Structures are given as structure tokens and as C-alpha cells.
Image (cartoon, helix red, strand yellow):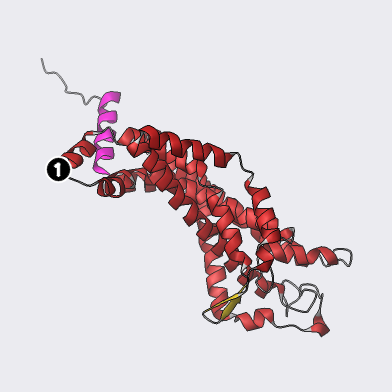
Amino acid sequence: MTVNPTISEPSVSAVDFVREETREALTPGQLVWRRFRKHRMALTGAVGVILLFLFIIGGSIIISETQANSTDLVNRLTGPSSEHWFGTDSVGRDVFFRIIYGGQISLFIGILAVALEVTLGILIGGVAAYYGGWVDALLMRFTEAMLSIPSLFLLIVLAKFIGRNVAQVTIFGRTFSGSIGIVILVIGITSWMYLARIVRANVLSLKQLDYISASRALGGSDSRIFFSHLVPNTLGPIIVSATLGLASAILTEAYVSFLGLGVQQPTSTWGNMMQQAQSFLIRGAWWMWVFPSLFIVFTILCINLMGDGLRDAFDPRSSKNI
């Protein structure tokens, strides 16, 4: 009697084992990228951000700042046409050209404000968790005190009484309003508190691990342990917070500039372009505020979508979707 051998289907545990082995062969960066790729909305946001940067950087190469600031009173307040794609403003400047250079300043403010926010958040939250004791108590009470300060109110007050009195600066032949520095400084020093709490929680859990004790036993200095071991292993939450903070900084700048208290002339941003359009709404010059506002909405939407995708990608619990 012969027995026909049959090939049995792999069990669920065997499939899980193969998946686990494949997962272990991937580096953390590869795991993050694989999770991020599966988030379609995040990819859409990332593509939108890339296109926005290409538009702003490439546009400034093709179109000079002199063209963006040139006035033509004969063609003032003309609507969109083949000659002026986004129309002209109250003194005949091309709105399309000004959106390119206004976007540069808006993104520049957002990036520098986030850089300041991340620096303060890492240092204050990380130092508080690493040293603990009275250092932790003092820095966390300071963080809680900063959380009680309304950042938007502080930004409006400082911009009102200081921003307009700051002298203009010239960098690489371009003249910028001194109020840019006030806006960057205030946004940066009033938005680091949440990141500091996140960094503190991560460092508290990481500093108890064996490799930190081994590094300390081998004579590693506090600064080396902090910047070489603790901070790199906290990059996930930092990147996510920085991405979402960039959208918030751009929106905050647009808000205060729209009120006339943010970045002052001659520097243009998307926010103060909308502020200049207020006086001409009655005349039907809708293009003066529609196009800058659309770019603000598009930028914030793309950055938030990308930030949501990064948050899911850095979440270890998302490994089951790989």
C-alpha cells in the first residue's frame, strides 16, 4: 500500500515567523520608509511639498526680485490674463511673481522658527530627563510657566511695539524687514514646550537601558552620551513634531501679517499680501487675496498630511502593516 505524500499549507505561525525574519532583516530606516510609502495621503503631501519648493526655488531663478517688485501704474488692479497669470496689485506689481518671493520668506520664517523650537525642546527636555532631581523639577516648572503664556498675544504685542522699529537689513544684496527676526524669535521661543515634554519622556525611558550604562562605564562623557546615543534614538518624535510645527509657524506668521503686525514692507509674505488686498475687496480685486490664501492652504495641508504619515511611520506598532 502506497501513501501519496501531500504538501500541507504553511501554518499561520510559520507565516508569521517568515514575516518576523524579514522584518528583522530591515534597518529601522527601511521600516520607516516602508510604512511611509503605504500611507497614500502622506505621499501626496510629500509630493506637494516637493513641488512647492521647486516652484519657489525654480521661480526665483527664472524671475528676478526686480521683476517681482517692479510697478506699472497703467496696469494696476488688472485681473488674471495671459500677461499676468495671477493679475496685478494696487501698484501694478505681478501677483504671481510676488507669490514666489513671498513664499520664500514664509517658508524661511517657518523653517528658522522650527529650528529654534527643536533646539530649545531637545536641550531643555533632554537635560531635564538626563540629570533628573532638582534640575528636572526646575526646568519642568519653567516649561509649565511658558505654556501659560499665550504665544499669539505675545507675538502681536512684540510685533506692535518692537517689530516696526527694527531697522531693515541687507543680505546678499536683498533688503529684508527687521520684523522678520522678531517673528522668528517669538514663534520659536513660544512653541518648544510640547516637544520638550516628548523628548523628556523618551530620554527617561532610554537612559535606563543597558547600552547607556555600558557607555557610561566605558568613560563616555555626559555630552557624548546625550548627543550620540539619546538624541539620535529620539529623532522619530522630533521629526514629526518639527514637521507639524512648520505648518503651525507658517500659519501663525500669515495670521499676524494679515493683521498688519507681522512682517513689514518692503519684504512680502503670503500673509501681508492678503493684508494689502483688504482695501481693494470692494473694487472686486479678488485675485489679490485668493491666490496667496490658496498657497497658504495648500502648503499647510501638504505639510500636515506628510506629518501624519511620518507619525504613523515612526510608530513601532505600525510594523504589522509592513
Vertical placement of 11 versus 275: above or below? above
Q: Most prominent secondary structure in the magenta stretch?
A: helix
| Residue 23 counted in the magenta span | yes
Of residue 16 and residue 30, the one placed in the foreground of this image is 30
Q: Residue at x 25, y 27 (%)?
A: 14
Q: Residue at x 82, y 75 (%)?
A: 77
Quarter containing the C terminus: top left
Of residue 259 and residue 87, the one placed in the foreground of this image is 259
Q: Residues within 10 Å of mark 1 (few under 14, many from 20)?
A: few
Q: Where in the figure is residue 121, as x and y percent of width and height? A: 45, 46
Q: Secondary structure at mark 1?
A: loop
Tell whether 275 sits left or right of 238: right
Residue to which mark 1 is pinned: 218
Q: What span is in magenta?
A: 10-27
Q: Where in the figure is residue 268, as x and y percent of width and height? A: 66, 70
Residue 11 in sight in this render? no
Q: Where in the figure is residue 317, as x and y percent of width and height? A: 39, 33
Vertical placement of 229 versus 104: above or below? above
Of residue 33 and residue 148, the one placed in the foreground of this image is 148
Q: How many marks?
A: 1
Q: Where in the figure is residue 226, as x and y percent of width and height? A: 30, 46
* Kind of residue at badge 1: Leu
Of residue 28 and residue 83, the one placed in the foreground of this image is 28
